[in-house]
Amino acid sequence: MIVRIMGEGQVELDDAHLAELNTLDDELLAAVESGDEEGFRRTLGALLDGVRQLGTPLPDDVLEPSGLILPAAEATLDEVRKMLHDEGLIPG
């Protein structure tokens, strides 16, 4: 799956890693719903770090359709709230 991190670029991520990242996504959803700014910052950072570590960056001159779009690290809690679905940022 191709994952876009807004403001950074695209990463190719094996679907096998989605379950692992979904745990962080669930924590992020809970932090956003409760308005926990500290938990939100920590969990968003961990989610983005996980995608970066588990995935392979695509070259900047390659543009593939993204199966998943994640917010930038500096996104606000309100910006991420608008991006969320019932299941969080990562479906499943």
Image (cartoon, helix red, strand yellow):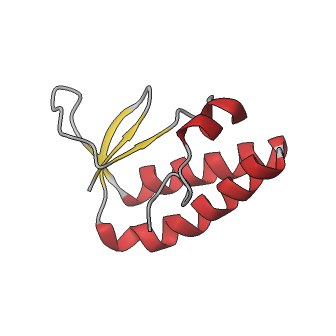
Q: Position of residue 24 (x, y in %)?
A: 61, 62
Whether 59 is drawn above or below 41: the answer is above
Among all residues in the image, which is located at the extreme front? 86
- Which residue is found at the position 44% from the left and 31% from the top? 6
76 or 48, which lies in front?
A: 76
Residue 76 in view, yes or no: no
Whether 67 is drawn above or below 54: the answer is above
Q: Position of residue 21 (x, y in %)?
A: 50, 64
The quarter in which the N terminus is drawn is bottom left
- Which residue is found at the position 76% from the left and 50% from the top? 33
- Which residue is found at the position 66% from the left and 55% from the top? 29
The quarter in which the C terminus is drawn is bottom left
In the image, 86: left or right of 60?
Answer: right
Q: Position of residue 23 (x, y in %)?
A: 59, 69
Q: Position of residue 78 (x, y in %)?
A: 69, 31
Residue 50 in view, yes or no: yes
Q: Quadrant of residue 14?
A: bottom left
Q: Quadrant of residue 35?
A: top right
In the image, 31: left or right of 59?
Answer: right
Whether 82 is drawn above or below 87: the answer is above
In the image, 92: left or right of 55?
Answer: right
